[in-house]
Image (cartoon, rainbow, N blue to C red):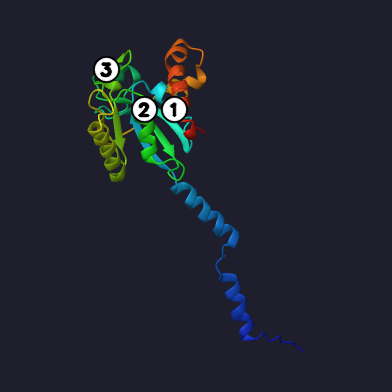
């Protein structure tokens, strides 16, 4: 005699429902994802031209709130320029440093303050012994707020005659940034005993450290 096992319809429906039910992320997983999104969106970018990027890079690497500093080229018309092409002065590019920073720690206004202090913004295409359009003073803004703040600060410096001559810093939109060759990155850190570093970069660093003690890492 055959025996039949009767399975309640409600149990079948429940079982199928469990099998097809999508996986729900735990509260921990959701929290981690939220933290990742917050971490990836809190950083901002600034790009400055203030003479030789070896000097500028070394200084901004010591500013609190700055996550990374890359040396590169911006403001020109040639794609993927090389250092030799830049030095010819015919590509229109500027030696720049591009910063990734936390605006909650250091604002763009504070970065501008450092920028105008560490070079001569009244000099056309020249910083010290470095001569050429690639050494011109420039702020390449990444958004409208940066543009307005840079223009306001520049106008204020000229109105108050902060320098003996007018500030000629170029304020232009950021278009393309080309990272410089690897040997230019972290130049001072890797070549601190080199002549240029000892007699040019180190004195600028010492001066910066004294003037901006509260902004150092």
The residue at the point 23 percent across, 23 percent down is: 165
| Secondary structure beneath label 1 | helix
- Mark 3 or mark 2, which is nearer to you? 2
Q: How far across and down, in percent of the image, does residue 167 sit? A: 25, 28
Decide which of tag 1 and tag 3 comes sooner along the chain: 3
The residue at the point 61 percent across, 84 percent down is: 10
Tag 2 residue = 117
Q: Give the camera-side residue of 15 and 215.
A: 215
Q: Is residue 10 above or below residue 60?
A: below
Mark drawn on residue 119: none
Left or right position of 20 against 113: right
Q: Is residue 153 above or below residue 21?
A: above
Left or right position of 178 against 210: left
Q: Residues within 10 Å of mark 3 (few under 14, many from 20)?
A: some
Tag 3 residue = 132
Decide which of tag 3 and tag 2 comes sooner along the chain: 2
Q: Are marks 2 and 1 in contact (CB under 8 Å)?
A: yes
Left or right position of 175 against 206: left
Q: Is residue 49 above or below residue 32?
A: above
Mark drawn on residue 211: 1
- What is the spatial separation of the Cα atoms under label 3 and label 2, in whole angstroms? 21 Å
Left or right position of 29 against 124: right
- What is the spatial separation of the Cα atoms under label 2 and label 1, in whole angstroms? 9 Å
> Which quadrant of the figure has residue 60?
top left
- Total marks placed: 3
Q: How far across and down, in percent of the image, does residue 164 sit? A: 25, 23
């Amino acid at each position: 005699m055959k025996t039949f096992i009767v399975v309640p319809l409600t149990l079948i429906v429940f079982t199928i429902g469990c099998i097809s039910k999508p996986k729900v992320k735990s509260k921990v997983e959701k929290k981690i994802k939220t933290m990742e999104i917050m971490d990836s969106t809190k950083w901002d970018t600034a790009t400055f031209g203030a003479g030789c990027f070896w000097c500028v890079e070394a200084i901004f690497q010591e500013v609190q709130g700055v996550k990374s500093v890359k040396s590169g080229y911006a403001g020109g018309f040639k794609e993927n320029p090389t250092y030799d092409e830049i030095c010819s002065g015919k590509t229109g590019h500027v030696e720049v440093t591009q910063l990734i920073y936390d605006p909650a720690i250091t604002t763009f206004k504070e970065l501008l303050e450092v920028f105008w202090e560490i070079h001569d913004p009244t000099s056309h295409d020249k910083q010290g012994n470095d001569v050429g359009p690639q050494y011109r003073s420039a702020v390449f803004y990444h958004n409208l707020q940066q543009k307005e703040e840079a223009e306001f600060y520049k106008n204020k410096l000229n109105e108050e005659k902060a320098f003996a001559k007018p500030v000629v810093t170029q304020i232009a939109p950021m278009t393309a940034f080309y990272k410089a060759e690897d040997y230019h990155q972290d130049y001072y850190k890797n070549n601190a005993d080199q002549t240029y570093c000892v007699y040019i970069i180190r004195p600028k660093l010492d001066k910066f450290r004294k003037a901006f003690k509260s902004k150092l890492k």
